[in-house]
Image (tube, helix red, strand yellow):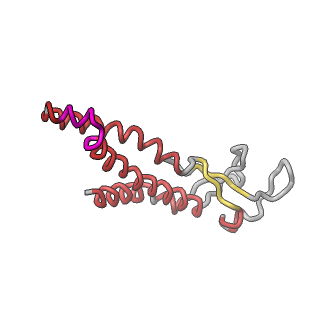
Amino acid sequence: AFPSSVAASSLNCYIVRSPEISTGVKLVNEAGEDVLPGETSCEAAKRGVHSTTASRALLQAPVYFLPPVLLSTVPMFKRLLAKNPMATVPLTTYLLLVSFGLGLPATVAIFPQMSEIRREDAEEKFQGCVDGRTGKPYEVFYYNKGL
């Protein structure tokens, strides 16, 4: 079930977000200002979609592995289930929700929402962008990778 869940979650995320790869995302400077108004970066969008898809795959790990480990190793849970086997479903459901609640912020935080892309890695149209405040070319651009 675990590999199937990872594949389904990742594929769902990729399919839903894949149109961004062809439309692109805007690149901004460290102040959040659009560096090339009206233009988008497909390379940054591709990186954003791939990192979001990876975080969705990683999210499955705490949900699948934490509840069984806790149920089999924590003495309080073992005693409770030995005395009252009917508590298995509610306790497992509760642990799944807690695992998801803890796992989601942790996996989303692996890849920062505002990601960066080096000038050399961006499309050609961004290569000549100059910071209006300093007069120097940008070394790094930022983009919102999404959640």
**Residue 73, x across and y down, in percent:** 29, 42
**Residue 67, x across and y down, in percent:** 29, 43
Q: Is residue 79 part of the magenta span, yes or no? A: yes
**Residue 71, x across and y down, in percent:** 26, 41
53 vs 12, left or right, is: right
* Span of residues in magenta: 71-81
53 vs 37, left or right, is: left
52 vs 143, left or right, is: left
Q: Residue at x 38, y 57 (%)?
A: 10
In the rendered image of this protein, does residue 61 appear above or below residue 100? Answer: below
26 vs 87, left or right, is: right
Secondary structure predominantly adopted by residues drawn in magenta:
helix
In the rendered image of this protein, does residue 96 appear above or below residue 84? Answer: below
**Residue 40, x across and y down, in percent:** 62, 57
Q: Nearer the viewer, residue 32 or 69?
A: 69
Q: Residue at x 70, y 65 (%)?
A: 125
In the rendered image of this protein, does residue 129 appear above or below residue 34? Answer: below
Q: Is residue 80 part of the magenta span, yes or no? A: yes
Q: Residue at x 72, y 49 (%)?
A: 29
Q: Quadrant of the N terminus?
A: bottom left
Q: Nearer the viewer, residue 63 or 44?
A: 63
The mark total stands at 0
In the rendered image of this protein, does residue 127 appear above or below residue 104? Answer: below
Quarter of the figure with residue 4: bottom left
